[in-house]
């Protein structure tokens, strides 16, 4: 047994595309002529995933992440190169893949088990565990085509993780479920990780990639563009995506406000800006002023721990400073009912302009959102004299030699 769960050597994947279905038929009938075009999705990919690693795949839409996962799962064959996998894979691929919509949830779970090599008797033992984890009630005996996307992902995750795989593949699935279920999944993924199993995690949510993964691979236009420690690679990717958005500036780069209405655990009520010393509510600050932001929130359900985040954005939507209590090793004691949280900035050093405040509350891993409010408050920086250009007044000294 070697040390790698997955090895890709010079892997390439081409798809044949047809301008219309007639061309596909023509190609079948007239074998000597080509009516298709070749479309290269992956080029010369070399990747080794050590056993026990949690690896994140990131990349913009259409970069080839899902194709790569399908090659690892054996759903697709590579056009060039070799894919070798050691161990049993269980994949939670993008919504829509995996289950037969005409069959009931239960039938699909049994089918999934059979594909994984389990006998009916073995699946009889696992079925109550899967059913209990998914918590979809009587829908387990209804055709999957009647499921909401949330129900689908609940069953898909429960079924994928409870068949004792060596390698778990999670593609964008956690983004669909409600917070309560996300928390259960994150716990389960952590358990899985701690037991030394391999996880391949694909997500557009770079925050969760930084939190969950030990290693990250950035796929760009079908190639590995950068790989390594998530703390280093993810910011490069974020910068690249931000630059792209700035170029296509009609696309908003702000995160929308969200709260999971199904399982509301926490509600952000109000955000205010105060003068640092007097604690008077204030909207306008001088460049070098200090400021306090207060966040009133209501905790509606008891939880073990919560993480709070406050981010300041510029008028153009650029992120100026995003902080959270987990990154600063601050623990918030979760008290049911109304609470007030303060963050003190001792020296703003921002240039004149309007700034907006985004506030978010997360579960203890800071991956699942309990509530998030974009533009929940704002403040202005004014200046009686012209001090410079840009966003931030960096502390500085001039020297001439
Ligand atoms: N069966 C197919 N036939 C032709 N082209 C395909 C096929 N499957 C995928 N593609 C193309 O391959 C490219 C890569 O797709 P893929 O789904 O792997 O990207 P991705 O990085 O997972 O994107 P996303 O983040 O949007 O899920 C896309 O341009 C897609 O249109």
Image: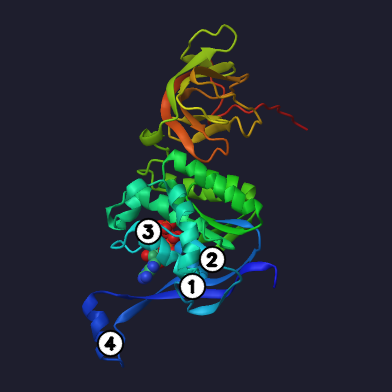
Residue picked out by circle 1: 74
Which quadrant would the N terminus be assigned to in this image? bottom right
Residue picked out by circle 3: 106
Label 1 crowding class (10 Å Cα cut-off): few <14, some 14-19, many 20+? some
- Image quadrant of residue 375? top left
- Image quadrant of residue 179? top left
State yes or no: discs 1 and 2 in contact (Cβ < 8 Å).
yes
CA gap between label 4 and label 2 equals: 34 Å
CA gap between label 1 and label 3 equals: 24 Å
Which quadrant would the C terminus be assigned to in this image? top right
Label 2 crowding class (10 Å Cα cut-off): few <14, some 14-19, many 20+? many
Residue found 66% across the figure and 31% down from its top: 329
Residue picked out by circle 2: 89
What is the basis of the colouring in this image? rainbow
- Tell me: residue 54, above or below residue 137: below
Q: Position of residue 228 (x, y in %)?
A: 64, 56
Q: Position of residue 342 (x, y in %)?
A: 56, 19
Residue 28, which numbered label?
A: 4
Lower sequence index among marks 4 and 2: 4
Q: Residue furthest left?
A: 22
């Amino acid at each position: 047994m070697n040390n790698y769960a997955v090895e890709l050597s010079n892997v390439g994947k081409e798809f044949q595309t047809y301008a219309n279905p007639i061309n596909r038929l023509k190609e079948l009938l007239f074998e000597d002529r080509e009516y298709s075009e070749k479309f290269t999705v992956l080029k010369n990919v070399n990747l080794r995933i050590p056993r026990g690693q949690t690896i994140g795949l990131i990349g913009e839409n259409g970069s080839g992440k899902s194709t790569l996962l399908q090659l690892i799962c054996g759903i697709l064959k590579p056009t060039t190169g070799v894919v070798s996998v050691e161990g049993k894979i269980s994949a939670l691929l993008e919504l829509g893949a995996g289950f037969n919509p005409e069959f009931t949830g239960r039938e699909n779970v049994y089918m999934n088990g059979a594909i994984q090599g389990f006998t009916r008797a073995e699946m009889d033992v696992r079925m109550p565990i899967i059913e209990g984890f998914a918590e979809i009630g009587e829908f387990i005996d209804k055709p999957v085509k009647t499921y909401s996307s949330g129900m689908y992902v609940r069953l898909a995750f429960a079924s994928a993780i409870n068949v004792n795989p060596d390698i778990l593949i999670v593609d964008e699935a956690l983004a669909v479920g409600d917070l309560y279920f996300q928390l259960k999944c994150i716990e389960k993924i952590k358990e899985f990780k701690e037991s030394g199993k391999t996880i391949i995690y694909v997500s557009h949510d770079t925050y969760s990639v930084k939190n969950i993964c030990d290693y990250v691979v950035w796929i760009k236009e079908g190639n590995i563009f950068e790989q390594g420690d998530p703390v280093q690679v993810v910011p490069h990717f974020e910068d690249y995506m931000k630059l792209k958005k700035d170029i296509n500036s009609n696309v908003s780069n702000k995160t929308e406000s969200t709260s999971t209405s199904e399982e509301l655990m926490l509600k952000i009520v109000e955000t205010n800006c105060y003068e640092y010393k007097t604690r008077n509510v204030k909207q306008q600050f001088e460049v070098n002023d200090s400021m306090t932001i207060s966040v009133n929130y209501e905790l509606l359900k008891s939880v073990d721990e919560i993480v709070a985040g406050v981010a300041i954005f510029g008028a153009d939507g650029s992120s100026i400073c995003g902080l959270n209590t987990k990154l600063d090793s601050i623990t918030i004691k979760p008290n049911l009912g109304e609470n007030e949280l303060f963050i003190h900035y001792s020296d703003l050093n921002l240039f004149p302009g309007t700034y907006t405040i985004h506030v978010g509350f997360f579960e203890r891993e800071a991956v699942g959102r309990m509530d998030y409010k974009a533009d929940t408050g704002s403040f202005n920086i004014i200046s009686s004299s012209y001090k410079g250009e840009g966003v931030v007044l960096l502390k500085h000294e001039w020297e001439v030699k």
